[in-house]
Structures are given as C-alpha cells and as structure tokens.
Amino acid sequence: MSGPNVKKGSSYRVTEWISATYRFATDRQDFRRNLLVNLGLFAAGVWVARNLSDFDLMSPQPVT
C-alpha cells in the first residue's frame, strides 16, 4: 500500500504507542484502567522504596 496518507517509519509507531498509553492512563471514566494504573504506580513506589533505600534493617546498628 502506498500513497500520501500512508505513514511509514518507527517514529510513527512510537508516537502511536505514546498517545495510546497517554489515553489509557488519563481515561477518567474507566474504573478498571484507573485501578490498573494506580496499582502499577503503587508497585513502582514500593519497588523504589525497597531497592533504593540506604537502610539495611538487618545490619547491627552503631552504638552512640
């Protein structure tokens, strides 16, 4: 298929993917989507809190 209306290239696919992701995350009327996005953000926050903290709770604490 060819013609002036056919868009080619990977940048078009990336743009479509980004716009679809944006629409997915910002649809305020769909409860299941909102639940999925919120759970994903919560899981990302838990991962950051567990893996990027400087505290090792199992190590002996220094005596002051």
Image: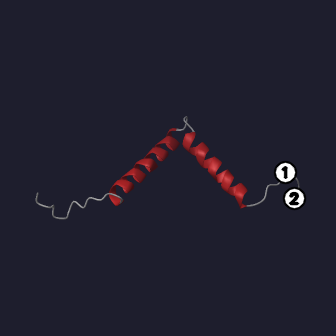
Q: Residue at x 45, y 50 (%)?
A: 40
Marker disc for residue 29 = none
Would you place residue 13 above or below residue 38 in this image?
Answer: below
Q: Tell me the quarter of the picture where residue 52 sits.
A: bottom left
Question: What residue type is disc 1 on?
Answer: Asn
Q: Position of residue 30 (x, y in %)?
A: 54, 38
Question: What residue type is disc 2 on?
Answer: Ser
Q: Position of residue 60 (x, y in %)?
A: 15, 64
Q: Quadrant of the N terminus?
A: bottom right
Would you place residue 15 above or below residue 29 in this image?
Answer: below
Outermost residue to the front: 64
Q: How is the image coloured?
A: secondary structure
Outermost residue to the bottom: 59
Q: Tell me the quarter of the picture where residue 62 sits.
A: bottom left
- Mark 1, Cα crowd under 10 Å, few <14 / some 14-19 / many 20+, is few
Q: Tell me the quarter of the picture where residue 2 sits.
A: bottom right
Number of numbered tags placed on the structure image:
2
Marker disc for residue 5 = 1
Q: Residue at x 50, y 41 (%)?
A: 34
Q: Give me the C-alpha separation between circle 1 and circle 2.
A: 8 Å
**Residue 31 shown left or right of residue 22 in the figure:** left
**Residue 50 shown left or right of residue 1 in the figure:** left
On the image, numbered disc 2 is attached to which residue?
2
**Residue 64 shown left or right of residue 43 in the figure:** left
Q: Position of residue 13 (x, y in %)?
A: 69, 56
